[in-house]
Amino acid sequence: MADKTLTRMDLADAVHSQVGLSRNDSADLVESVLTHVSDSLVRGETVKISSFGTFSVREKAARIGRNPKTGEEVPIHPRRVLTFRPSHLMKDRVADGNKR
C-alpha cells in the first residue's frame, strides 16, 4: 500500500496541468471548492459529489461510555460527527485497485 498522501497542492497541480489555469488560480480554485464544501457541512447540509460519495454531518446523542482499562463509567457528551459514504463507482474503483 502506498504511503503517499494527496494534498491541496497536489490537487492544485492537477488543476494546473489538466485545465491550464495558472498555479495561483488553480490553488485559489481548490481552496474555494474546499471552503464551500466545509461551510456547507458546518451548516449541517449534505454534500454529494456524483461518482465519488456523500459527506454528511450526524448528530450523536450523549451516552455513558466505559474506560476499558479501569471499567469506570464516563459520560460522553453529545457531538456532531462527519461521515462519508462512498458511491458504488468509488467502491468498485477502489476494489479494482486491490486486484493489481
Image (cartoon, rainbow, N blue to C red):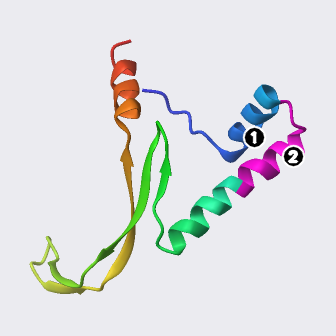
Helix, strand, or loop for circle 2? helix
Percent of width and height locating residue 8: 68, 46
Q: Quadrant of the C terminus?
A: top left
Residue at figure coordinates x 73%, y 57% from the top left: 32
Residue labelled with disc 1? 12
Q: Are marks 1 and 2 in contact (CB under 8 Å)?
A: no
Q: Does residue 100 appear to the left or right of 29 in the view shown?
A: left
Tell me, yes or no, whether the highlighted magenta stretch contains residue 52: no
* Res 90 → quadrant: top left
For the record, the magenta segment spans 20-32
* Residue sitting nearer the eye, 17 or 98: 17
Residue pointed to by mark 2: 25
Spatial CA span between label 1 and label 2 = 9 Å
Q: Residue at x 46, y 73 (%)?
A: 44
At x 53%, y 73%, the residue is 42
Drawn side of residue 93 relative to residue 78, left or right: right
Q: Which mark is residue 61?
A: none
Dot 1 or dot 2, earlier in sequence: 1
Label 1 sits on what residue type? Ala
Name the spot of residue 94 as percent of width and height, x first. 39, 28
Locate the N terminus and report the quarter of the image it occupies.
top left
Residue kind at label 2, given as amino acid type: Asp
Is disc 1 surrounded by few (<14), some (14 to 19) or many (20+) residues within 10 Å?
many
- The extreme left residue here reads 71
Front label number (1 vs 2): 2
